[in-house]
Amino acid sequence: MGRLQALLGKLPGVGRRSAERMAQALVRDGENLLPNLVAALREVEETVRLCSLCGGLTLKTQDPCALCRDPRREASQLCVVEEPSDIPLIERAGAFRGRYHALLGKISPMQGQGVPDRRVEALLKRIDSEGVREVILALNSDVESDATASYLADVLAKRPVKVTRLAFGIPAGSAISFSDPVTLARALQGRSPVGPS
């Protein structure tokens, strides 16, 4: 049971206590839940993979993924995200029609993690071979993501591409009074013109 708890605890967002409760639930309801979970994990292992181009999730029979194969996507724009799960979130917004590149991590010295070198090398290769003119860093807003953005900006400075980052600011439907000082500062720095120019 200890091994199961340790493995569950490695999942994102699952702490020690949550992993313990999950393991106990699997044992307690083992006849129904456990076989179905094992079957679902096997199915994922057999059918799903990371896209060989963008790093997003795709079926093993559809690699590269549908977004990478879509000729209507704007090849000159490449949106760099931290994790494959970020891609569908941006897609749902409906405002981006370019291509994606998942880093599969971010620089986190405290946890001994970094962006896999192979994903940075793949990013550079794509910029050189696909005619990318703009790299949009769609990274989270935390210290590790800021470090990752700075690192990528330095690496990409040697390439003939425009490097941008998502604007940070006040969430839609929120008030200035609910914003923290960092959010307000970033909103001021990322301000955009209004009206005719």
Image (tube, rainbow, N blue to C red):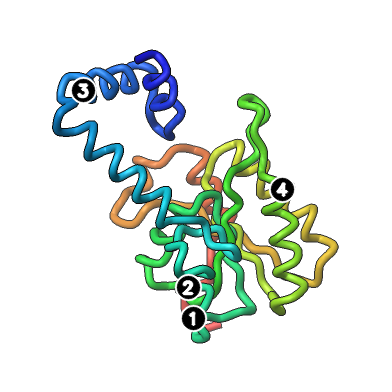
**How would you rate the neighbour count of disc 4 (Cα within 10 Å): few for under 14, some for 14-19, many for 20 or more?**
few
Residue on which disc 2 sits:
67
Residue on which disc 3 sits:
25
Element marked by disc 1: loop
CA distance separating discs 4 and 1: 30 Å
Q: Reading the chain from its start, which is encountered first: label 4 or label 1? A: 1
Three-letter residue code for mark 2: Leu
Three-letter residue code for mark 3: Ala
CA distance separating discs 3 and 1: 42 Å
CA distance separating discs 3 and 4: 43 Å
CA distance separating discs 2 and 4: 27 Å
Residue on which disc 1 sits:
70
| Residue 131: % across, % down | 71, 79
Q: Reading the chain from its start, which is encountered first: label 3 or label 4? A: 3
Q: Residue at x 24, y 18 (%)?
A: 24
Residue closer to the observer: 96 or 186: 96
Three-letter residue code for mark 4: Ser
Farthest right residue in view: 158
Residue closer to the observer: 157 or 49: 49
Residue on which disc 4 sits:
150
Image quadrant holding the N terminus, namely top left
